[in-house]
Amino acid sequence: MDKLILASKSKVRYEILLKYNIKCIVEHSNVDEEPVKQSLLNEGATPEIISKNLAELKANKVSQKLHDQLVLGADSVIDLSGELISKPENREQAFNILKKLNGKIHHLISSVCISKNGSMVWNYTDKANLTMKEFTDGDLKEYLNKISDEDLYSYNVYQIEGEGRNLFSKIDGDQNTIMGLPIDKIKQYIEGLQ
């Protein structure tokens, strides 16, 4: 197989692929996610459906331009009792998200899609359950002060492999899924092609 094309700006996803010896090049999809999310929410879509749709949209958009190439699109969302929680755009939003998750169980949903010639050929969605400890507002602000802007906007509101691990009393699920890429299933699919 030639190199996989990663339709994502996420450095984390790129690093996971490299760590697992999957050669890839990055081609940003430049999908404007917010109107898509809003449209799907208006139709009553669940966070999982939204994640799947965005992963497919990103992969298809890039694969339309690249003949006979496999393109990987991915999307991750937080599902808090059916409410979609997206990545923060600023520190105030990040703080409000952490307050909302404080002391509760939520699901982190990561969807991936592989497309070829503008159409999906494979997809997979995985879910992790995370139980956040209870914190004061001061604790949450202190946590956010330890995280750079780049990390905050790259990893949603927590870095599970770093400082963010301390936010949780319980984590059920694959760490790579939480970081945005269920790599084991992607590897299985790619190896099945060879």
Image: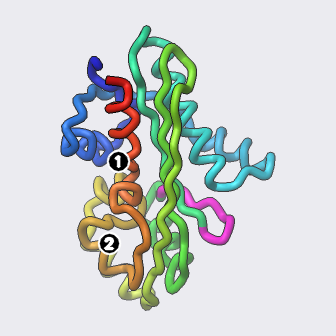
Q: Quadrant of residue 141?
A: bottom left
Looking at the rendered structure, the kind of residue marked 1 is Asp
Secondary structure state at the residue bearing disc 2: helix
Looking at the rendered structure, the kind of residue marked 2 is Gly
Residue identified by numbered label 1: 184
Q: Earlier in the sequence, mark 2 or mark 1?
A: 2
Residue identified by numbered label 2: 164
Q: What's the mark number on residue 5?
A: none
What residue is shown at x 32% (from left), y 26% (from top)?
4
What residue is shown at x 48% (from left), y 41% (from top)?
112
Left or right: 10, with 103 as reference point: left
Q: CA distance from mark 2 to mark 1?
A: 23 Å
Query: For the magenta stretch, what is the residue range?
Result: 80-87
Q: From the viewer's perspective, is residue 46 above or below residue 167?
A: above
In this view of the protein, which residue sits in the foreground, 156 or 71? 71
Residue positioned most to the top = 67
Left or right: 47, with 180 as reference point: right
What residue is shown at x 49% (from left), y 24% (from top)?
115
